[in-house]
Image: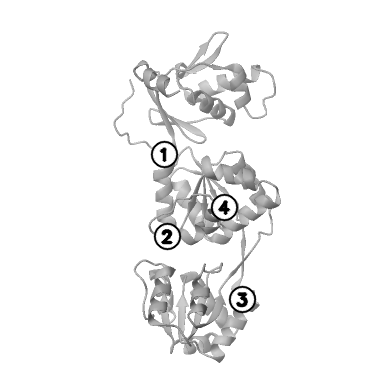
């Protein structure tokens, strides 16, 4: 019989799973973190970033702030703040901008942007331990903002309710759009990712910005696939967001997401390392421990890659563990198999070879196939079916 004790497999915790990455910025870093833990990665940037030095809106905001200093500046991201200073330097306005900001109360969203502020020779007045823009807003409103001029660094998307709340409190708000999102120049990878999501051949998809999530949903809607995409994200594919702001476009469509406690790439990957294995189906079959993952199977802790057709058959069998599944039903589970039941026999032979343990699946003459569920567990699964 299989050993239920914890094993120390050589593969990573995400081995056998395929994860989609929609990020444009830091996509290589996120992809490397996922691959290091064993995942297969599908990358499709759902947007592109307008270079800061080419952004006329940022130039106009910079000149406005130099011309008339704000009372308070809110810095939200390190890369955005650094990019703003670098862009100002490129326009010959860097020293003027820093000189103006030296007399301004600066609030920083978190430790990374604090570091960027100090690297520029400035000092922040305050930063919330929670790294939450909601806490920044609460502090400002409690102190009172009526009559104040506040510069807010926008990080790619409008901060939901933040600017509106400040204006409702009587503040004049100057938005600083440090970078802007546009649809990708090549929409092909996004379309392929949507097709893959709808086909349920991804196990999870990651989002690191709200615009990426909104862009993916918008493209699916243009193609008439929005309902199919939402159904996949709601049941079969795990949507993982780096934080609550990123999740808003998905939540607005009724899609639940998972998010790490700390809004960073590392914790996001750690979250997937816990969530995806916990969602995998594990069964005791023919004296072996079989764990069914996205594109592979763990047999007694050994990773066995399985072709897509074989995975389709295995999932159909695992939905009725120990029960006979007819060739006709298995044929329907095979994508694009047509009407020839011989396709089932061919795919089944390849599946058995891939698993490396032929006795896991039994042939029941003239009826079909069944997973050879261990006798001690038959009663449990019989009652559940």
Question: How far separated are the C-alphas under marks 1 and 2?
Answer: 22 Å
> Which mark is on residue 173?
none
Would you call the spot at circle 2 few (<14 residues within 10 Å), some (14-19), or many (20 or more)?
A: some
Q: Which residue is mark 4?
A: 253
Which corner quadrant holds the N terminus? top left
Q: Is residue 336 left or right of residue 157?
A: right
Q: Which residue is mark 2?
A: 263
Task: Report the mark closest to the observer, 4 or 2.
Answer: 4
**Residue 123 visible (yes or no):** no
Vertical side of 231 occupied by 347: above or below: above
The residue located at (46%, 59%) in the rendering is 244
Task: Report the mark closest to the observer, 3 or 2.
Answer: 2
Give whichever of discs 3 and 1 has the lower sequence position.
3
Q: Secondary structure at mark 3?
A: helix
Q: Nearer the viewer, residue 158 or 212?
A: 158
Would you call the spot at circle 1 few (<14 residues within 10 Å), some (14-19), or many (20 or more)?
A: some
Which corner quadrant holds the C terminus? top left
- Coloration mode: one colour
Q: Secondary structure at mark 4?
A: loop
């Amino acid at each position: 019989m299989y050993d239920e004790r914890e094993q120390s497999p050589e593969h990573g915790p995400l081995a056998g799973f395929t994860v989609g990455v929609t990020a444009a910025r830091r996509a290589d870093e996120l992809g490397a973190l996922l691959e290091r833990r064993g995942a297969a990665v599908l990358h499709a940037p759902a947007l592109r970033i307008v270079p800061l030095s080419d952004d006329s809106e940022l130039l106009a905001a910079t000149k406005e702030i130099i011309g008339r200093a704000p009372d308070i500046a809110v810095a939200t991201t390190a890369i955005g703040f650094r990019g703003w200073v670098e862009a100002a330097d490129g326009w010959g306005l860097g020293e003027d901008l820093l000189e103006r900001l030296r007399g301004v109360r600066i609030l920083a969203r978190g430790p990374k942007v604090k570091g960027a502020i100090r690297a520029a020779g400035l000092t922040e007045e305050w930063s919330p331990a929670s790294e939450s823009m909601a806490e920044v807003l609460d502090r400002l409103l409690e102190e009172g903002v009526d009559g104040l001029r506040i510069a807010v660094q926008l990080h790619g998307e409008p901060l939901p309710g933040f600017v509106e709340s400040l204006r409702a409190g009587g503040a004049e708000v100057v938005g600083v759009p440090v970078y802007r999102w546009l649809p990708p120049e090549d929409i092909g990878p996004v379309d392929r990712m949507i097709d893959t999501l709808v086909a349920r051949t991804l196990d999870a998809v990651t989002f690191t910005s709200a615009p990426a999530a909104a862009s993916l949903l918008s493209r699916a809607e243009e193609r008439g696939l929005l309902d199919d995409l939402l159904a996949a994200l709601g049941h079969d594919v795990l949507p993982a967001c780096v934080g609550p702001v990123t999740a808003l476009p998905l939540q607005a469509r009724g899609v639940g997401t998972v998010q790490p406690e700390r809004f960073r790439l590392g914790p996001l990957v750690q979250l997937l390392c816990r969530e995806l294995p916990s969602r995998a189906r594990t069964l005791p079959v023919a004296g072996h421990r079989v764990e069914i993952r996205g594109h592979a199977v763990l047999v007694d802790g050994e990773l066995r890659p399985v072709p897509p057709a074989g995975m389709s058959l295995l999932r159909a069998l695992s939905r009725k563990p120990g029960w006979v599944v007819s060739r006709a039903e298995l044929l329907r589970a095979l994508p694009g198999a047509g009407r020839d039941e011989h396709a089932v026999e061919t795919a089944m032979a390849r599946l058995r070879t891939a698993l490396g343990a032929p006795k896991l699946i039994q042939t029941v003459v003239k009826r079909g196939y069944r997973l050879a569920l261990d006798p001690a567990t038959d009663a449990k699964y019989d009652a559940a079916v």
